[in-house]
Structures are given as C-alpha cells and as structure tokens.
Amino acid sequence: MADSVIEAPEISGFSAVGASVLRRRALNEVFIIIAVAVMLIGGLELGLRLAHVPPYIFPPPSAITAALVHGFWPLLPHIATTLFELISGFIIGASIGFSLAIIVTQFPFVEKIVTPYIVLLVTTPMIALVPLLILRLGFGPEPRIVAVALAAGPMVMLNSVTGFRRTDEMRISLARSFGATPLQVFLKIRIPQSLPMVLAGLTVGSIFGLLTAVAAEMAGGQSGIGTRLVYHSSMLEMPEFFAAIVVLAAIGVAIHLFYGWLGRKLVLWSA
C-alpha cells in the first residue's frame, strides 16, 4: 500500500491577516487618543474664552501654543541643560541601584544593611537636600546631577530586586543541577525573567529624576527648564510658563514611549 501524505494548510495568510488586524487596531487607538485630545483642548479653549478668564491666570491653549512656537528656540538650551542633568544623574543612580540589586539578591544579609538607607532616600524629598548639595558642590550642574541620582537609584534598585526574586526557582535549581555557575544563572535566567520589573524601575526612576532635576533648578539653578518656570511665573508670563510645562510633559511621554519600545525589543530577545 502506498504511503499517503497529508499536506498541512498554508498559514502565512493567517499571519498576514493577524498583522493587518493589529495594525488597524493600533491606528484606531491612535485616532481615539488624538480625537479625545482635540475635544479636550477645544473644550478648554472655548470654556476659557466664554468665561473671560484673564490670560495671566490661565491662558487658552491657543496662547500656549503660540508661546511654545515663538519661544521654543530660546528654550532649547534650557531643555538641553535639564536633559543633561537627567541623563547624567540617571546613569549614575541606575548603575548604583542595579548593582545593589544584584548584590542584595546574591547576598540576602546585605539587604538588612542597605534597606534602611534606601527607604530613607525614597521617603525623603530630594528638593529638601538641594540647598545642602549646593553648599557642598556649588551652583553648577553637580548638585542637580547628584539629586537626580539619589532620586532614581532607589527606584531602580527596589524594582530590580523584586524582579530578580520573582524568577522561577525550579528553573534555577535545574540549571544548577547541570552545573550552571551563579553568573550563568543570573545572566540566563534571572535577568531575562525580571526584565518587566527592571524596565518599570527604569521608567519610574527616569520620571522621578526628571521631576527632581526641574525642582532642583527651581530651587537654585542658573539654567534649565525649572529656572524658566520660576522666571515666567514671577513675570506673570503664563503662556510661556505653561509652554514650558508642555515641554516637560512631552519629555515624560517620550520617556514612557522609549521604555515601552525597549521593553518590546528586550522581551523578543529574552524569548
């Protein structure tokens, strides 16, 4: 009897259809977000004008947009200053926080020593330390960089430790039974499985760092978005004040989108 061969149906069409559906769903979500934003901004514009709210109290969105367009280039050096302080401080704080998370995970007794200080940093508003940092480090960017590092580091550490401890212990035991070293276990099992929590810590740490940098600039900076907020509010230039806030919000959204994109890439890599 001749062998019969059953051919599997082609599924490439199904994957193409699935990708098309996902793209259409993403476009619909973007359209809804834009439509809601337009409705909110339009309603706010109309409400402020009908209520005759003075622009020095709350300017309409059109005035804020005009101030942002005309004042963006003068604001650009201050944006660069804030981003420099944020990135520099975050790299320092995240590196220390991630390293401490690894040490605490590998040596649990260290947690009893480190945790009280981490909790102290988390519960202490960094803005309260800025005057002390300025007295010690001067009026340059150094005190703000240190403040950002102190704000971001604990967030990265706490989330990373949580992620490292949520890994599959059975998989770790199996790897050790086959002779895996602690470094191999950490690189091949703990880090890939803890990526969501680590990325959450990086996201929160970045946002906290941004807020701390701006607050420190407002307390004693010579340049940066925070100094512009202080200047425009003191001069009652509310359109320019809110334009600077819009820039800060855009930076925060960009941080969120960046870590979302990075998370999708790293999840594919870890899989």
Image: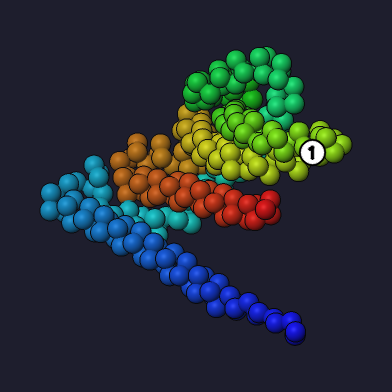
Q: Looking at this view, name the residue that lies furthest to the right.
A: 179
**Kind of element beneath mark 1:** helix
- Residue 135, percent across and down? 59, 20
- At horizontal 53% and vertical 38% (from top left) the residue drawn is 204
Within 10 Å of the Cα at label 1, are there few (<14), some (14-19), or many (20+) other Cα atoms?
A: some
- Which of these two is toward me, 11 or 264? 11
- At horizontal 70% and vertical 20% (from top left) the residue drawn is 108
- At horizontal 50% and vertical 74% (from top left) the residue drawn is 17
- Residue 189, percent across and down? 72, 41
Quadrant for residue 110, please give it.
top right
Question: Does 237 appear above or below 216?
Answer: below
Q: Mark 1 points at which residue?
A: 175
Q: Which colour scheme is used?
A: rainbow
- At horizontal 54% and vertical 51% (from top left) the residue drawn is 260
Question: Does 247 appear above or below 105?
Answer: below
The answer to whether residue 134 of the structure is visible from this angle is: yes
The disc labelled 1 sits on which kind of residue?
Ala
The answer to whether residue 34 of the structure is visible from this angle is: no
Viewed as shown, does residue 126 lie left or right of 243?
A: right
- Residue 130, percent across and down? 54, 24
- Residue 154, percent across and down? 59, 28
